[in-house]
């Protein structure tokens, strides 16, 4: 059973808001009209949005309603035109670019539709790419390798750490992607249509995994999905239309 509440805030008083957006608008420049006047597109229109620690939020809405834009703003991939974006205790818009990059690396885990994995590398090394690039060696690299192995275990790939990516199924690749997103110990996990390339059964498995990891790692997870059948894994459903939040509902934990 779902309970409708005020559209802009459904985080329970007891839950810590890991993501808190107030009055956020995002306007993209979109070329020029025939008279040479600049044209703009309003992707987000005065959005209030919260996502709590240890909760999974499903973000739904028609194509073009602003779902990806909202994820991009939360993940500091795009600067909103106006409004306040808090991730944990950090006011993202007040950060300099370097600190925003650090936030993207350390505080936010990103999971995309198609796992963007490197075909030349084995499964464990997908999780260690940034550590290799940063030149980590010795004891520190060993610790990171242990973390990678723990995470691969958690996502059900404990026995596949040396496998090459092309030998994995779509669902297994998405699990690698999820494990990689957790490498930085994020407070927030953002997933943009993580199941759209998978069949129904694998999609449910991935959503169940995200639901479990949300609790286990105490992250605030926001999942964009077109598939209404997958919303059952969420604690909260937020619906966007034309860049605005039109409803926010708390959901009963029907699946666990
Ligand atoms: N980089 C951009 N430049 C200009 N307009 C953009 C840009 N990105 C998105 N838009 C526009 O902003 C609006 C919201 O797009 P967005 O991708 O956030 O929607 P969405 O709900 O994620 O759509 P979909 O479900 O199709 O992925 C759309 O009108 C889109 O055309």
Image (cartoon, rainbow, N blue to C red):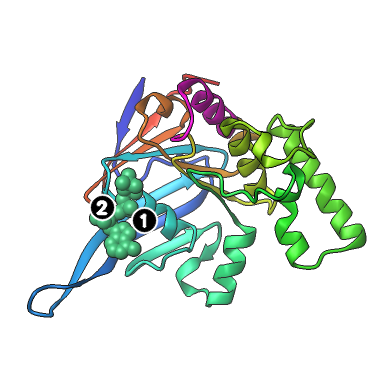
In percent of width and height, residue 254 lies at: 46, 19
**Quick check: can you spot residue 46?**
no
Quarter of the rendering occupied by the C terminus:
top right
Ligand 1 within 8 Å, label 1 CB: yes
Ligand 1 within 8 Å, label 2 CB: yes
In percent of width and height, residue 215 lies at: 61, 34
Q: Which residues are magenta?
A: 196-211
Q: CA distance from mark 2 to mark 1?
A: 9 Å
Q: Is the Cβ of the residue at disc 2 closer than 8 Å to that at disc 1?
A: yes
In percent of width and height, residue 85 lies at: 43, 62
Q: 138 and 126: which one is in front?
A: 126
Q: 244 and 71: which one is in front?
A: 71
Ligand 1 shown in quarter: bottom left
Mostly what secondary structure, the magenta segment?
Answer: helix
Query: For mark 2, what is the residue?
Result: 243
Circle nearer the N terminus (2, 1): 1
At 37% from the left edge and 30% from the top edge, which residue is drawn?
Answer: 227
Q: 44 and 200: which one is in front?
A: 200
At 34% from the left edge and 65% from the top edge, which residue is drawn?
Answer: 83
User: What label does residue 69 carry, if any?
Assistant: 1
């Amino acid at each position: 059973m779902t309970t409708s509440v005020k559209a802009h805030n459904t985080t329970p008083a007891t839950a810590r808001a890991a993501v808190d957006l107030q009055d956020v608008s995002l306007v993209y420049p979109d070329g020029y009209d025939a008279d040479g006047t600049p044209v703009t597109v309003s992707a987000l229109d005065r959005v209030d949005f919260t996502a709590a620690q240890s909760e999974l939020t499903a973000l739904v809405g028609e194509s073009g309603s602003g779902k990806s834009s909202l994820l991009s703003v939360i993940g500091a991939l795009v600067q909103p035109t106006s409004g306040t974006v808090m991730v944990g205790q950090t006011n993202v818009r007040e950060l300099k670019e370097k600190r925003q990059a650090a936030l993207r690396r350390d505080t936010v885990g990103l999971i995309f539709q198609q796992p963007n994995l490197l075909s030349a590398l084995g499964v464990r090394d997908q999780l260690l790419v940034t550590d290799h690039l940063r030149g980590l060696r010795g004891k520190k690299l060993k610790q990171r390798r242990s973390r990678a192995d723990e995470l691969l275990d958690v996502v059900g790939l404990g026995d596949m750490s040396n496998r090459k990516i092309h030998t994995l199924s779509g669902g297994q690749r998405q699990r690698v992607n999820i494990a990689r997103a957790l490498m930085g110990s994020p407070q927030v996990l953002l997933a943009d249509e993580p199941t759209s390339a998978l069949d129904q059964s694998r999609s449910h498995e991935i959503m169940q995994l995200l639901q479990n990891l949300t609790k286990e790692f105490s992250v605030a997870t926001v999942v964009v999905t077109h598939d209404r059948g997958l919303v059952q894994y969420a604690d909260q459903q937020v619906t966007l239309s034309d860049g605005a939040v039109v409803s926010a509902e708390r959901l009963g934990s029907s699946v666990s």
